Image (cartoon, helix red, strand yellow):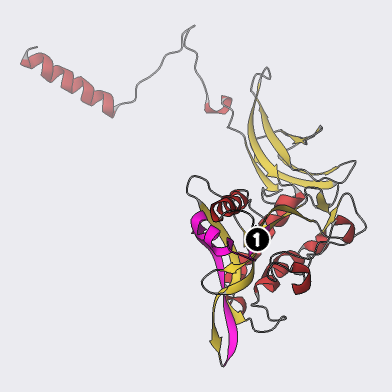
Amino acid sequence: MGAFVRRTGAILLSLACCFPLVAFATEDNAETSLTDTVASPSVYVIAPSGDTSYESDNQLSVKVEGAHVERIALELRLADQTLRFESAGSALEHTFTLNAPQTQGATLVVRGYAEAADQREATYAEQRVTVLSPKAELIERMIALAYANSRDSRYMFAPAETDYDIGVCKNFVMRLFDTYSKEYRMLAYPDLPLHMPKNNSKKACAPYDYGIEWKPETAEDGSPFEIAAQFKYNDSLTEKENEDLARKLIEQMKKGDFFQIVGYYGGGNGPHSMYIIRDYQPDTGMVHWTDSNMRGTRVNGARWGYLQYNADADIAWWVKVFNMKKRGATLYRLRDDLYKY
């Protein structure tokens, strides 16, 4: 290419940048206007929030706001049915009323529709929100309370000398449950308020040490807890056989379980109560929990305990804690039939 041609090309390109190009409409190239385009729709679910359950035993309130939408459609996908509701406009408030108390979670699907300009097809924005089961909601609320307590000076380092002190381990886990228990009931026993059993007596625990388990109450007594697993050192087995059984208990831990032990855990030698905040992690072998007074010290001769949130230790450490004569552990789990009361 000659120098003249290169200079001419550069001049033409420069002129193209300075002056707008004019597009001429033809049969195959019709002019378009910005007013012909449809703005993309969007929806935002205000309620439910995704970390809550139903408002009551059989109601769920939904609040949605949208932009560039002409109608909003809801689908509440339950375990046994799907409920639907639709309304014109860019905002919606609706309460689903169900025919029975709900114990399982659900999925809320929200779609905000914007009709296309030619009315032949519709585009929509979609958002999905999880509705927690009442049991799952209660677990999340207890974990959140434990975290809040761990940042509260009243509980971070608290008296743990007498049975009534707030720093005592069993008082801590009972507080997590008692704070919210009045808002829930068991479907099988709807007339019974819920409560957490106290520790079994020293006499009833024998020949094992005090603290190995709670009082043996059932749902008929108002206790929504069931024993998910239990280990009691068996003198007729070898130490390795006992170790395998202790390990099997820990491997069954789930988020929301209450863990009652009697053993030697460094900061103490005896009974201890704690709350599991994650499923046992087999890939790392780690247990995560929250508790009070596993670690502590004495102030003017009285015991004071520290509150731990997201404490962790591996399974090998935990096995050594209670795999010894007269010692053991019990894993308590909430029943699945809880509902909002």
Residue 17 against residue 295 in the figure, above or below: above
Expressed as whole percent of the image width and height from the top left, the position of residue 56 reads 84, 52
Residue at 65 percent of width and 84 percent of height: 161
Expressed as whole percent of the image width and height from the top left, the position of residue 308 reads 55, 69
Residue 100 against residue 125 in the figure, above or below: below
Residue 289 against residue 272 in the figure, above or below: above
> In this view of the protein, which residue sits in the foreground, 32 or 178?
178
Expressed as whole percent of the image width and height from the top left, the position of residue 188 reads 89, 49
Magenta segment:
301-330
Q: Is residue 51 magenta?
A: no
Expressed as whole percent of the image width and height from the top left, the position of residue 145 reads 65, 65
Left or right: residue 12 versus residue 67 is left
Q: Quadrant of the N terminus?
A: top left
- Where residue 298 sits, quadrant-wise, is bottom right
Question: Which residue is under mark 1?
Answer: 329
Looking at this view, name the residue that lies furthest to the bottom.
300
Q: Is residue 304 magenta?
A: yes
Residue 273 against residue 20 in the figure, above or below: below
Residue at 57 percent of width and 28 percent of height: 35
> In this view of the protein, which residue sits in the foreground, 114 or 306?
306
Can residue 85 be seen in the rendering of this structure? Answer: no
